[in-house]
């Protein structure tokens, strides 16, 4: 039980049983009175906790006065008892709160308490509401963009049926814009949107839609502050609004990687309770042309080709990725080029250390502590020390830069399981030319527990910035020039051990699910905490962790407060 002073305590009825209800600053707690008395003779602590419940105040969605109901109890004896009680306790208030279910999913549950007097009922509602109003990280006004064509084209329905009712219950007002074309949301955010009115922006869609919103919001922030985005070394100004994601796309890897599940109700609840998680944003340039911001995956070669091919099959819905994946795998292209990168300083962990980024991750927190002189120095040293740049020239099947784990339901540990959400770095994964079978083995390891980096043809580096320059060639190169020219599309099947490789000159970069026009890029400015999304990385907590959190209530608020240490103290998105 919470050790904080009680704000309010009453004997009320809940489901026709008398309960003692107690509110402290951080916990709403209720305990069945009769049952615990009956069992007090056997002094069973378990029996008492089995009939007691605690809800963190920070996870209360709303409280409201409700009509008397019989709690759906239709048994005759109980109905009679219920009627008697409802005469004695005719005033009811209902608390809606977050209930954790399996696989990191959250649901909104209701508990109703019946009071003897209206004054007492009103007092409970008022005091709970007062406590909720102290939670300043909760959004009150949101700007919502819905992509009606993302994923299975269910964005509108998902929002209207699953999300809007929860926002209404939590008294969040939302201005909704259903996008009419690609980049509608981005351009609206860049120029038109009156952002002063809102506490956050919500996107209903997939990773591409999220990327659009990030792009629009970060660009707007830079424009408002006079920052020249075309300079790769420009110091970007953090956004003051937070971004929430309601998954309604095909992959939804950003949502999965931060919440642990792709579930619209869970995401809506995280938004309502004001959870946030800082995220790294990197800028992608081609020379002095600014291309895009990226928050999750930049992929050249295999992933770039899959995306390019899948865009032509958008009509297939999410299944297009499977088809394009198989086709690209069979094509087995490789690409020649030069990768240069600036590795991170020691102490930032490495991509194979098996340290998973969690809520309150010490590496990300350490990075955020700007008073840490040692850290600042090492960063300065990194910037100035030209000798630290490494260069690799080679033939690559895939070049991937993961700024987060990029976990998704198909690859639950992700492309780089130990990548951090907000440490200012990215994991650069180079998959060199190898046989189809070897590449298949590597891909397979994304879906099981084996280390996908434990192959001679794969290397991974934690980097602060990197460049890629494709090998300039006009013609298709093949290992054996005497081979006849290959047909477009599928390459001939070859035995697993042979390297039946050939290549077109360039692949494309897939940047958070969008295709970039240029193959030669510079990726830099891994600015920490450019964006705070409305969802925390709590999903690594086990069920027992959750129970512990309920028992030690104050830890929750500390944990959540620990998540909001960054660029903006109020209701940022
Ligand atoms: N009204 C619209 N019509 C056509 N395209 C749109 C519209 N609104 C947004 N888009 C574009 O649709 C693209 C894909 O959207 P989204 O990311 O939501 O779904 P997805 O590609 O199916 O999912 P994922 O990116 O998770 O795989 C985005 O690049 C976005 O710019």
Image (cartoon, helix red, strand yellow):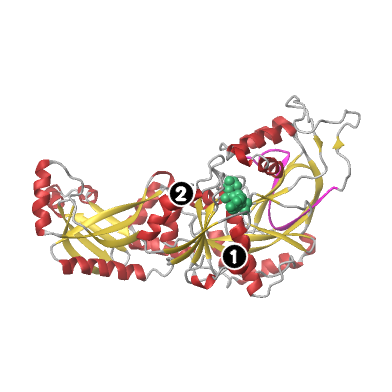
Q: Residues within 10 Å of mark 2 (few under 14, many from 20)?
A: many
Q: Which mark is residue 366?
A: none
Q: Which residue is mark 1?
A: 189
Left or right of residue 536: residue 504? right
Q: At 22% from the left edge and 69% from the top edge, which residue is drawn?
A: 123
Left or right of residue 432: residue 572? left
- Kindly report the distance in space between the C-alpha atoms of the residues bearing marks 1 and 2: 23 Å
Q: Which residue is mark 2?
A: 158
Q: At 64% from the left edge and 75% from the top edge, which residue is drawn?
A: 225
Left or right of residue 80: residue 566? right
Residue 462 within the magenta-colored segment of the rendering: yes
Q: Secondary structure at mark 2?
A: helix
**Picture quadrant where residue 332 is located:** top right
Count of numbered circles in the view: 2
Q: Secondary structure at mark 1?
A: helix
Residue 470 within the magenta-colored segment of the rendering: yes
- What range of the chain is rendered magenta? 452-471
- Residue 505 in the image, given as x and y percentages of width and height: 83, 43
- Residue 15 in the image, given as x and y percentages of width and height: 18, 51
- Out of 92 and 262, give the one closest to the viewer: 92
Quadrant into which the N terminus falls: bottom left
Q: At 33% from the left edge and 56% from the top edge, which residue is drawn?
A: 97
């Amino acid at each position: 039980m919470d050790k904080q002073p009680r704000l309010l305590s009453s004997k009320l009825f809940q489901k026709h049983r008398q309960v003692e209800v107690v509110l402290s600053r951080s916990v709403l707690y209720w305990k069945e009175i009769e049952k615990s008395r009956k069992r007090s003779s056997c002094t069973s602590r378990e029996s008492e906790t089995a009939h007691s419940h605690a809800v963190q105040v920070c996870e209360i969605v709303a409280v409201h006065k409700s009509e008397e109901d019989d709690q759906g109890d239709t048994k005759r004896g109980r109905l009679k008892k219920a009627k008697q009680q409802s005469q004695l306790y005719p005033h009811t208030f209902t608390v809606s709160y977050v209930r954790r279910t399996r696989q990191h999913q959250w649901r909104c549950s209701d508990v109703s308490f019946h009071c003897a007097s209206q004054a007492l009922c009103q007092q409970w509602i008022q005091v709970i509401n007062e406590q909720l109003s102290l939670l300043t990280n909760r959004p009150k006004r949101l700007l919502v963009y819905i992509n009606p064509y993302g994923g299975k084209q269910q964005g509108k329905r998902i929002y209207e049926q699953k999300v809007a009712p929860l926002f209404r219950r939590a008294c969040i007002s939302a201005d909704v814009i259903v996008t009419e074309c690609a980049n509608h949301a981005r351009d609206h955010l860049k120029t038109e949107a009156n952002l002063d009115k809102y506490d956050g922006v919500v996107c209903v869609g997939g990773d591409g839609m999220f990327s659009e919103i990030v792009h629009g919001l970060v660009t707007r922030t830079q424009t408002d502050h006079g920052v020249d985005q075309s300079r790769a070394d420009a110091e970007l100004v953090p956004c003051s609004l937070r971004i929430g994601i309601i998954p309604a796309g095909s992959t939804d890897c950003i949502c999965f990687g931060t919440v642990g599940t792709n579930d619209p109700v869970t995401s809506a609840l995280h938004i309502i309770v004001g959870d946030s998680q800082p995220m790294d944003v990197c800028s992608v340039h081609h020379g002095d042309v600014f291309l895009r911001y990226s928050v999750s995956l930049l992929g050249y070669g295999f992933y770039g080709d899959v995306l390019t091919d899948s865009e032509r099959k958008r009509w297939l819905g999410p299944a297009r990725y499977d088809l394009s994946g198989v086709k690209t795998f069979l094509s087995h292209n490789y690409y020649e080029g030069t990768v240069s990168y600036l590795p991170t300083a020691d102490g930032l962990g490495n991509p194979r250390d098996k340290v998973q980024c969690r809520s309150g991750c010490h590496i990300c927190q350490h990075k955020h502590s700007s008073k840490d002189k040692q850290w600042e120095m090492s960063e300065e040293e990194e910037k100035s020390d030209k000798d630290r740049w490494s260069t690799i020239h080679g033939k690559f099947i895939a070049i991937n830069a993961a700024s987060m784990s990029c976990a998704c339901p198909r690859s639950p540990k992700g492309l780089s399981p130990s990548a951090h959400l907000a440490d200012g770095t990215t994991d650069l994964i180079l998959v060199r030319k190898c046989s189809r079978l070897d590449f298949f083995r590597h891909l397979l390891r994304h879906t099981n527990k084996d280390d996908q980096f434990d192959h001679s043809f794969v290397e991974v580096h934690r980097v602060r910035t990197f460049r890629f320059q494709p090998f300039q060639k006009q013609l298709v190169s093949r290992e054996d020039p005497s081979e006849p020219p290959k047909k477009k599309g599928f390459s001939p099947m070859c035995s697993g051990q042979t390297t039946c490789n050939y290549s077109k000159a360039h692949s494309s970069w897939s940047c958070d699910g969008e295709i970039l026009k240029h193959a030669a890029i510079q990726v830099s400015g891994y600015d920490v905490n450019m964006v705070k999304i409305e969802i925390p990385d709590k999903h690594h907590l086990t069920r027992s962790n959750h129970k512990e959190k309920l028992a030690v209530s104050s830890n929750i608020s500390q944990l959540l407060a620990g998540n909001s240490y960054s660029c903006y103290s109020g209701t940022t998105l």
